Amino acid sequence: MTALIQLSGITKVLKGQEQPRTILDGVGLEVFPGESIAIVGRSGSGKSTLLSVLGLFDRPDQGTYLLSGNDISRLPERRAAKLRSSHFGFVFQRFFLLKHLTAAQNVAMALVNGQGWLPRRERRARVMQALEQVGIAHLAKNRPARMSGGEQQRVAIARALVREPKILLADEPTGALDTETGALVIDALLGVTAHGCALILVTHDRDHAARMGRVLHLDAGVLTEQVAVGGTA
Amino acid sequence: MIRFSGRLRSALIIGLQGIRSRKLRTLLSMVSLFLGVLAVVVVQAGASIAERAVLADMELYDGFDGTVVMEMGGSSPKVEPIVLDTVAGRSDAVAMTGMQAIIGEPGVRPVNQGGGSFDDSWGGSPMICDEQGNCREQTPAELGPQGQAIELRLTALTGDVRQFRPYRPQAGQWLDFTSVPMMAPRLVLNKEAAKGFDRYKVPAEMRVPGASANMTPQFVGVVDDGDASPRAYVRLDELTQWVPAGKLVDPNMGEVRVLMSSGTPVEQVLTSKLKAVNIEPYVHIVNSREEQESELALMRWIFLAMAGLVLLIGVAGILNVGLATVGERVEEFALRRAVGTPRALLAGIVLAETLITGLLTAALAIGASAAALKALVTLAGDSQPFLQGVEFPWEAGVAGVIAGLVAGVLGGFVPAIRAAGIPIATVMRA
């Protein structure tokens, strides 16, 4: 099977300080469609930076990043934005929902992003489909203030899924949730891998990591594979 | 094209969502901008109204732009027949001959001797000139006793002059040139003459120098001709039934003028005929708009510059609120970038918000100005003639919209650049 993502020798150095600090040091990684990967490591080990590079928020200083076989290591911002829209979905620890919008409008935000135009009816159908996928279609008209943390995170997941991404990047999505709700969110995230979407989860929670197909450990910018402790859902 | 349309729609949808979610801030931006746009609209409206009023007055007195005016001294007896022969029966040229007329009791001195305004008393005795141009003051014996009579200038017309001079009807009707000439000449008075007849009750007997007999005129209407002296207009063919040819131009204060459309052959023919008898006519083309524009342009620019300064304060208000709003919305913009929104669209969203704010403010300022003008016209239109019939000028509306758009762009430019430059990675880090 062709790898969806191939990273080789990815290095990221934090400049602007007296001593430049290497955040990612020759990271190599292959991600396949439908695969679930957990990245674990201590705070400051470079997990979020790796996710930023993977999600095209940031460019690596060195190394090669192939997406579906195409080198996107030095992509101009305009094309990076287009790829973020077409290939990636993002879920963050803080849900980043806009308070003044309803759940449906928050999800639709990913469709009204200047990357093609969908008629309102089609937009609405896709939004409702994404909300149903995470089991909160009945909350479509609610604003974030009237939803629990778990519900808000599921709206954020629906927002990430609405464009049917090929890769879902989740940066500590359960960090602000209790154990039970966190488990439900992980269920929802793992559910998308059944449709061929790859999931890369950054987490501190060993239980959640254990539910992924692979667990990678990042320490001082070096990525190493741990012994598999679980399987794909 | 489709991509552009999609981005435009996206910017508008998100911009409107932003405005709806921050109503108070939008209102504050609008308040600061309102005065600036209002100042631009008011200056532009005032300038346009003043320009039209001045132009209308100039047209009233000088004629429509493009009218060819030929003037000749009336002292030569050769002028009158040449002019009347050439112009007679033509629709593209009208001759106007002026002479003195007294209406009222016979053998008395008019209340406004000399034909001046009824409110002015210049004193002194009127002058009288012979055919050689020698003038002297009239003696008391020549003047006679003062009585119920009014002196005015009588202007005889060969055709309907309103195609060249836009006299404003005040009462009654204008001279009818299509009917058969009447024995009792029909007169149309100007406002000053009408005032005289209203103030002094005089008998309707008209004396014109050189006339075979005194006439009984019919007053058919009153017009505003812009002249401060009393004047009456009459059909030349009605006057010639009483005043023989050759006497239609007053040797003392005679005036002969021909108004023509541009391009008419009358100008060339008449000039040639007059030059053949050694008379050099003075010809000019009415160009009121250009003269007036040069006079008003400087003043308009000065006022617009002042309005621009007020607008700048409004722009500073939008800029201030815009920067604060972008600072508050860092996460939103970073999130939008994360889901694939291009930087250009983020800038577009901010600009759309400020442009919509600017346009809404412009609409309010234009509406307020138009309503204020309407109220002013309703309340003070009767006492202030220049306000009569005044409508809100479209130029002021256009200026207001442009001011709103410019303020939106200027006030939103820096916040838009800031919004487009927000880094995703830093903001979205857990």
Image (spheres, coloured by chain):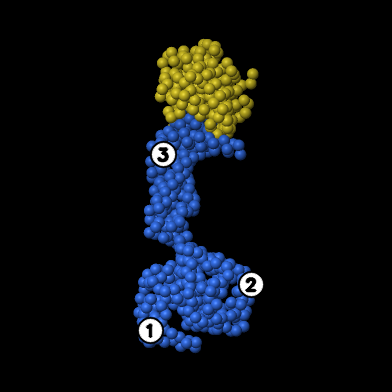
Chain colours: A yellow, B blue
Does residue A111 appear in this view? yes
- Residue at coordinates 41% horizontally, 16% vertically from top-left? A178
Q: Between A105 and B41, which is closer to the camera in this rendering?
A: B41
Viewer-nearest of labels 1 and 2?
Answer: 1
- Label at residue B265: 2
Which chain's residue wears label 3?
A: B
Q: What residue type is labelled 2?
A: Pro
Task: For mark 2, give the secondary structure.
Answer: helix
Q: Distance between the residues labelled 2 and 3?
A: 65 Å
Q: Where is residue A85 in the image (x, y as percent from the top left)?
A: 56, 29
Residue underneath mark 3: B26
Q: How far apart are marks 3 and 1 (CA)?
A: 80 Å
Is residue B404 depicted above or below B385 in this figure? above
Is residue B415 depicted above or below B370 in this figure? above
Q: Between A141 and B32, which is closer to the camera in this rendering?
A: A141
* Tag 2 and tag 3, C-beta contact below 8 Å: no
Q: Position of residue B56 (x, y in %)?
A: 48, 63
Residue underneath mark 1: B144
Q: Which amino acid does label 3 sit on?
A: Thr
- Residue at coordinates 48% horizontally, 23% vertically from top-left? A140
Task: For mark 1, give the secondary structure.
Answer: loop
